[in-house]
Image (cartoon, rainbow, N blue to C red):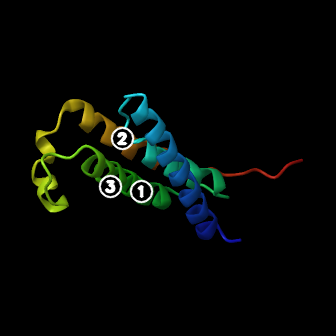
Amino acid sequence: MNDPLRRLVGAVVGGAIGYGVFRILEVLELRFLGVVGVGLALGAGFFATRRHIGWGLVFMVVAFVVSVVIEWYHHPFPREALSDYFLHFWGLSWRSKANHLAAAAAGLWFGSGRTRRPRA
């Protein structure tokens, strides 16, 4: 299986696990919105066969967008469209912004993958 396909499979698996962890944390009343994006990037990086910064940038953007959409869907302002939510984005609390930033940073770091060395 080639590297991009392995990354996409890993992203799907990691995103599903991340969403499960998010739901568990929500039941425990802990709010870490970026856990889905982090799971997505961890899965993609774990399944990768080589390190590539381009993929890290892609998963940085994807992790950020996923964390914003998760917050919009689960913790919305009074029911508004997603496009209106982005107008209020800068009015969010510093904790929400930190969650989104952490998701983006994890997406960059873990989504880049790693270089696997052959075993001796």
For mark 3, what is the residue? Answer: 65
Q: Amino acid at mark 2?
A: Leu
Residue 113, can we see it?
no
Horizontal relation, residue 3 to residue 22: left or right: right
Q: Earlier in the sequence, mark 1 or mark 2?
A: 2
Depth check, front residue: 113 or 96? 96
Q: For the point 32% across and 55% down, which residue is it?
A: 65
Q: Mark 1 against mark 3, which lies toward the viewer?
A: 3
Q: For the point 21% across and 31% down, which residue is it?
A: 94
Q: CA distance from mark 1 to mark 2?
A: 20 Å
Q: Which mark is residue 81?
A: none
For mark 1, what is the residue? Answer: 57
Depth check, front residue: 26 or 65? 26
Q: Which mark is residue 33?
A: 2
Q: How many marks?
A: 3
Q: Earlier in the sequence, mark 3 or mark 2?
A: 2
Q: CA distance from mark 3 to mark 2?
A: 11 Å
